């Protein structure tokens, strides 16, 4: 079982959401590894917050699926296994295709500008070398279609899925798997998302998801997805 790393204190005037965000970023960046026990006394001391405030923040992580409470054992960061990843990507494939199909005739200028803006922010994050920000910005880029497709349930589904996907990358730190060029790969996705052919977009989506799942599975030693 992984031990807890040392965390920087949270400012005295922080609220529960700031504490939860600090823990969320530590988990999704891999600083706190999946399977690690969240020891309240230690975390409260390192973050310089009360145990009660910390407990509320951890409850928020549990509700969002990033942590799990085990009766008589404590609270642990959620672990991601092969079955979970395959299920998440299967659902994501269906929902993201549906989201693009819904929005396709309504990709107004604001959507196009925002997608380009999020792409630029994602590439900047990759250039900075900040893994946590790279993972967050990639989720932000892909999340736009869920936010704007017109189905009010889609953003919540995306939030649940992306946290599991980010945990998968946190396991492996995406350091050793054979990688395609990140910018070129996502630029092709951007071009298809802004292009004229929905069929091309859906085909690129399938290819994109297969690459992402294969990267995570390679790093974690899980069976790779069947290439399309």
Image (tube, helix red, strand yellow):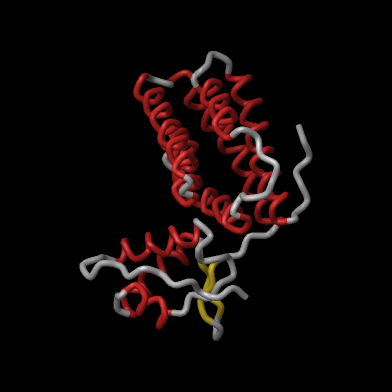
Image quarter hosting the N terminus: bottom right
Q: Residue at x 55, y 86 (%)?
A: 72
Is 92 located above or below residue 54 in the figure? Answer: above
Left or right position of 50 against 87: left
Q: Is residue 1 visible?
A: yes
Using the rendered view, name the quadrant where residue 90 is placed.
top right
Where residue 94 appears, as percent x and y from the top left, is: 62, 37
Q: Position of residue 132 (x, y in %)?
A: 47, 52
Task: Compare residues 31 and 147 and report the one nearer the observer.
Answer: 31
Q: Is residue 149 visible?
A: no
The residue positioned 61% from the left and 30% from the top of the image is: 205
Choose top left, top right, bottom left or bottom right for residue 106. top left
Point out the residue furthest to the bottom here: 72
Report which quarter residue 52 is drawn in. Answer: bottom left
Residue 44: x %, y % from top left: 36, 77
Q: From the viewer's side, name the closer residue of 102 and 2.
A: 2
Nearer the observer, 156 or 180: 180
Instruction: Name the residue located 57 percent from the left edge and 24 percent from the top edge.
Output: 188
Does residue 130 lie above or below 198 as drawn? Answer: below
């Amino acid at each position: 079982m992984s031990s807890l790393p040392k965390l920087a204190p949270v400012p005295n005037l922080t609220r529960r959401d700031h504490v939860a965000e600090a823990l969320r970023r530590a988990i999704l960046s891999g600083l706190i590894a999946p399977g690690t026990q969240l020891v309240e006394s230690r975390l409260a001391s390192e973050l310089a917050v009360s145990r009660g405030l910390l407990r509320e923040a951890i409850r928020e992580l549990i509700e969002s699926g990033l942590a799990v409470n085990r009766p008589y054992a404590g609270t642990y960061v959620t672990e991601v296994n092969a079955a979970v990843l395959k299920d998440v990507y299967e659902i994501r494939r269906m929902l993201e295709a549906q989201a693009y199909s819904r929005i396709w005739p309504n990709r107004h200028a604001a959507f196009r500008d925002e997608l380009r803006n999020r792409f630029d922010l994602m590439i900047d994050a990759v250039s900075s070398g900040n893994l946590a920000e790279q993972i967050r910005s990639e989720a932000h880029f892909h999340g736009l279609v869920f936010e704007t497709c017109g189905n009010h349930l889609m953003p919540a589904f995306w939030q649940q899925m992306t946290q599991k996907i980010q945990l998968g990358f946190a396991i492996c730190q995406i350091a050793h798997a054979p990688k395609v060029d990140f910018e070129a790969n996502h630029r092709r996705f951007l071009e298809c998302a802004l292009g004229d052919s929905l069929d091309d977009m859906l085909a690129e989506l399938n290819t994109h998801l297969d690459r992402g799942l294969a990267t995570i599975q390679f790093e974690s030693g899980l069976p790779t997805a069947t290439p399309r």
